[in-house]
Image (cartoon, helix red, strand yellow):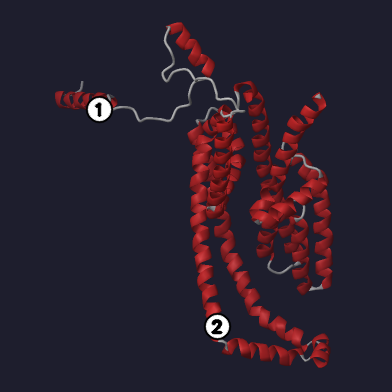
Amino acid sequence: MLSSPRLAAAGVLLSVARRLRQPLPGAQPRLRFEMPPEHEDEAGAAAEDGTSPRFGSPGPRMSAQHPLYMGFMGTVGVGVALLVYWIGSNTTQLLLWIVTALFITLGLDPVVRWLEGKNIPRAAGILMAVATLALAVAAFFATLIPTIVQQVTQVVQQAPQWVQEFIDSDFFRTVDQQFGIRDRISQELAKFVNNPEAMGGIFGGVVGFGSTVANGLFGALIVLVLSLYFLAALPSMKKWGYRLAPRSRRHRVEALSEEITGSVGNYVIGQAAVALLNATFAFIVMSIIGVPFGTLLAFVVALLAFIPLVGGMIAGFLVTLVALTAGWQTALVFAICYFAYLQFEAYFISPRIMQKAVAVPGAVAVISVIAGGSLLGVLGALIAIPTAAAVLLLVKEIFIARQDSR
């Protein structure tokens, strides 16, 4: 039997728990921006109740042939176009952050939906996916950065020796006797050191590099926060986007949009897996045959492998050039192994990983990657193939279908 003080304490705790569960006096639930009901449902409910909709029924539209309508809408269209151009030209960095966050969101959304299929709430799935990604990236860089710093320091320390060996080589001596390269380099170096503007440019470059690093960290934080918000609101964003289409075409718009977003998500996950396998194979080969700076080069291979089609080729050529410092035999063995792996990857690995992702003709993919890289850099090259696939799907399902029906 419990004593009376304990019973009294338990009663007080139960009373406090009941009061905490009750809403505060005068408190109201937080207002949320809800999706408006379907027009037909609202009209049906109003007809059953014998009342009119809350804000009244929409009236007839003005004729599109009316001169006032044509002039006003034409002026508004030009003004909106100029406003959009001005906003886009002054918020380029923000737009890049938004595009990057959307790209990451579409890549993580299949994982979140898979977790939802395992009866895990969406909020918990988002936290699990983002936390896993953040921990993986942090662990990767925590392991990699000390090695990269060490190997970059070795490169800087050995660079003077490489330069001196090149200067002492018979090839450089022959070229120097014919063109006087050594004297020309000495003259230009003396001019550069004695030029205050050039030395100020070096200082400005250092400050600019620090500013670039700070902006990069800030941009990464913004992209992470936007990705969290986009992941949480992605179903609502899609629903709002579908409601902007006419009701008669809404189902078709939803089907096309789901196909595009699903393909982009599968592409991001597949490309990440392909890049990881590519870098792992390159690191194993470099470790076996003794290519210097293997960890640093594996990191470069992983980054370049994210660029479809041409990234692996560029990485292979760069590592082969570095492998030449260990001997032409080492470079030849690495080139044979790595480029053979690229062929194996193209015919056996990528088709199986990318079977649920996008399918784009080779010529279109190459042109898209070059155009995307020219416009938006690495980000443009990454999103080039999903964008090209989306355009091809829309052309096939809308334009070609319309042409076939005529």
Give x and y (percent) for residue 70: 59, 33
**Displayed quadrant of residue 312:** bottom right
Residue identified by numbered label 1 = 24
Is the C-beta separation of discs 1 and 2 under 8 Å? no
- Residue type of the residue flagged with mark 2: Glu
300 or 223, nearer to the observer? 223
Residue identified by numbered label 2 = 197
Give x and y (percent) for residue 259: 68, 32
Residue 195, visible in the rendered structure = yes
Q: Answer few, some or many: residues within 10 Å of disc 1's Cα (few below 14, many 20 plus, some between 14 and 19).
A: few
SS for dot 2: helix
**Quadrant the N terminus occupies:** top left
Residue projecting furthest to the left: 4
241 or 3, nearer to the observer? 241
Q: Answer few, some or many: residues within 10 Å of disc 2's Cα (few below 14, many 20 plus, some between 14 and 19).
A: few
303 or 218, nearer to the observer? 218
**Quadrant the C terminus occupies:** top right
Q: Nearer the viewer, mark 1 or mark 2?
A: 2
Measured in 3D between alpha carbons, the distance from the residue under mark 1 to the one under mark 2, in whole angstroms, is 68 Å
Please name the residue shown 82% across and 57% down the image.
Answer: 339
Give x and y (percent) for residue 59: 50, 20
- Residue type of the residue flagged with mark 1: Leu
Give x and y (percent) for residue 308: 73, 51
Residue 215 sits above or below residue 232 on the image? below
297 or 42, nearer to the observer? 42
Q: Which mark is residue 295?
A: none
Q: Say which label, 1 or 2, has the lower sequence index.
A: 1
Residue 48 sits above or below residue 254 on the image? above
Please name the residue shown 43% across and 30% down the image.
Answer: 33
Residue 307, visible in the rendered structure = no
Please name the residue shown 69% across and 83% down the image.
Answer: 161
